[in-house]
Image: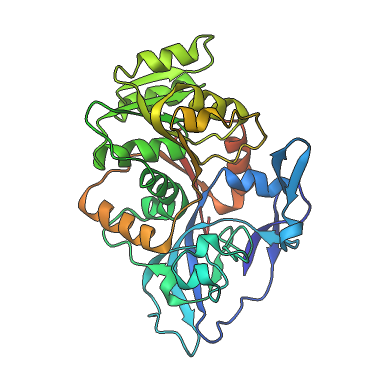
Amino acid sequence: MKSYDIVEWGKPLQLQVRETPQPQGSQVLVRIDACGVCHSDLHIQTGALDLGNGRKATFESIGVQLPFTMGHEIIGVVAAVGPESDAVVGSRCVVYPWQGCGRCHACRKGREIDCENGAALGTRRRGGYADHVMVPHTRYLLDYGTLDPLVAATCACSGLTAYSALRKLPDMEPEDSLLLMGAGGLGLAALGLAKGMGCERIVVSDIDDDKLMQAARGGATSTVNVQQSDAGAALRAAAPAGIRAVIDFVGSPETVELALSVVGRGGTVVVVGLFGGALPLSTALLPMRNIELKGSYVGTLEEMRDLLALLQREPLLSVPLTTYPMSQINDALGALATGKVVGRLLAIAGE
């Protein structure tokens, strides 16, 4: 099989050729049709996440060994199955990649994303920048029905992450405003889903006018370029009844600080982005303003099933999609690193 791997941290991926593995036990071998190119892969490629105050979390410290294959938004076809699997060879599927150990309390309760020994495809185990991927069990293979296969692929991370973050919001009244910080692939996915989930007033912020134009076309009530000096005032002015909730898809110290400063009393701030860094936080203001600050990381298997079912009923995702041949995966990652991509990128296997 062919894969495009990190062979040295911070360097371009390299083509690797190895024997195609054969599934054992409950394993399923999936022939990959396409894999989404996610911004988190840029962090993985460097080998570490910025925790702020000079601290970093390296991927080697959590067991990632080189060469390593990234890619976690995978669609494909079942190519072979182990003797204990009930998967059907030839069936189409989107893969749920956020797998845990399967044995701990969190895994047994369906919260594999909270597993202390997570084994997610593309972040811990070999993923989808390849022509095949090994999936440990049939339960991680989901039928995407009549959805566009490329849209289904983005549901494994971008769509799921947006959906799970939206489900963490408080009840939204018609006059309440939701602020989405960041109009990249995640923010645009959240915009479409939020409208279908009952949010009527949605403000979108970013530093790129092209992305904000796409958000306006996608139905944002208003957009704000936060590079302006009075960004906080502009955001408050865009929400006449106040900002009830914020989802921060950037996760920088500056965006989190801005979110906390503009959210209304009794509001909720959900941080999703992995930009990294740290910020000083006035802990007294959290109870005094009755603010809830929480993190949200991708979503559960149940949430992904719910998302796919929702999209079967309503085509809420209209995020622009751009494809690259898998052989040009470094070009795709390079384009993503510029910060100028509007929408989502996907790598097409076999090209």
| Residue shown at 70% from the left, 63% from the top | 16
In the image, 6 versus 101, the foreground residue is 101
Query: Along the horizontal axis of the image, is 165 left or right of 295?
Result: left
Query: Along the horizontal axis of the image, is 8 left or right of 3?
Result: right
302 shown above or below 37: below
Residue 301 position, x and y percent, is 41, 63
Residue 119 position, x and y percent, is 60, 66
Q: Is residue 5 visible?
A: yes
Residue 331 position, x and y percent, is 62, 41
**Residue at the limit of the structure toward the bottom, as seen here:** 83
Query: Along the horizontal axis of the image, is 40 left or right of 216?
Result: right
Q: Is residue 341 visible?
A: no
- Which quadrant of the rendered structure holds the N terminus? bottom right
In the image, 298 versus 131, the foreground residue is 298
| Residue shown at 42% from the left, 45% from the top | 165
Residue 277 position, x and y percent, is 67, 35
161 shown above or below 335: below
- How many numbered markers are drawn? 0
| Colour scheme in use | rainbow
